[in-house]
Amino acid sequence: MLIKQMCLVLIALLLNGVAFAAGESAVKISVAKSGATVMIDHVIKDGKALVSVVDAKKKPMLGLTVRDFSVTQSGRKGKVTSIQLFSENQDVPRHIVLVLDNSYSMYERKAIKALLAGVGELLKTVRPIDDVQIVVFDNKNTVKMGGRDLHVQTFGSNQPDDLQAFADKAYTTEGLTGGTALYEALLAGLDLIKKMPAAEPRFMVVFSDGEDLNSIFKRDDVFMAAKGLDRFKVYAIDYMGRTATDKFLTRLAVDNKGQIWKARSEANLVPIFQSVASKMQHYYIVNYLFPTTGALTVAPANLTIDEVTTT
């Protein structure tokens, strides 16, 4: 009797155009442009994916339309029903953790004004549906995050003015710190990332002008905490004095599908923050369907995702 009931349920679902995945299947979204590479960053839900598209020089490709995209799965050709620029979308939130080095050396290097202007450029892209958390050093107090006592302050909002006000205060004379607790701030940031929905875009932006000198934790603790997470990107801005990019920040960014920028002077800070902001916006939301017997169906959410390059 139970088997008969299950068969009836399956037949009813199939008649309504619902398909079942036989194991994991690979969805491929392509763009009909030579040298274009499409990376599916997130399957938001069935039949809706967040993708980034770059050209052969790794620069974002803008201005694409529905006709430029195609989708396939296990040899089946699907239909792209609509696309939307991420900046125009109002139902897919971003989750951003901004880790800022507010050590006293920023005052000594006369870079505070440029840094805060750069932060402002990034905050201009924040939408009401976004979630932004700022982490800064605080040598005088500790907070418990992820089971650790960390010398940091955090502030979360979706209001750019409130976020800017918190950042401004962190770089006043009272807000600057004599020590550098970068690893602790990163552990706090990773704990915040962990609590954000993995099915939605998550980013951690890290700014530092010096190596860690005062954390009670080590870089390996940071790598271990990051390794336990999935589906987020790290964008690092290195404002340290040396010519080459910092090895620790470089590894943190590369290991987590991100990128590192070298700011050689305060004049570089605003353009770099603008580039980081652009990186978090140059996406398309692609809606698609796949044919089944007598109907179209969305693809199942448990998919193996491939990066596709058009030759």
Image (cartoon, grey):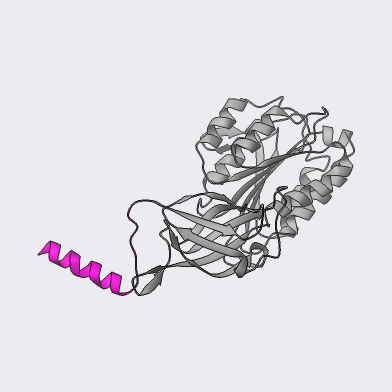
Q: Nearer the viewer, residue 178 or 40?
A: 40
Residue 80 place in picture, x, y as percent: 53, 68
Residue drawn at point x = 62 percent, y = 55 percent: 52
Q: Magenta residues: mostly which secondary structure?
A: helix
- Residue 291 is left or right of residue 225, and the answer is left
- Residue 286 visible in this rendered orientation of the protein: yes
Rendered image quadrant of residue 176: top right
Residue 3 place in picture, x, y as percent: 14, 62
Residue 48 place in picture, x, y as percent: 51, 63
Residue drawn at point x = 29 percent, y = 70 percent: 14
Residue 249 place in picture, x, y as percent: 68, 33
Rendered image quadrant of residue 216: top right
Q: Is residue 20 above or below residue 118?
A: below
Look at the image and say whether residue 10 sits in the magenta stretch: yes
State the extent of the magenta-drawn residues as a range. 1-22
Quadrant where the image shows the N terminus: bottom left
Q: Is residue 189 above or below residue 197?
A: above
Q: Nearer the viewer, residue 305 or 34?
A: 34
- Residue 182 visible in this rendered orientation of the protein: no
Q: Nearer the viewer, residue 69 or 17?
A: 69
Q: Is residue 115 above or below residue 132?
A: above
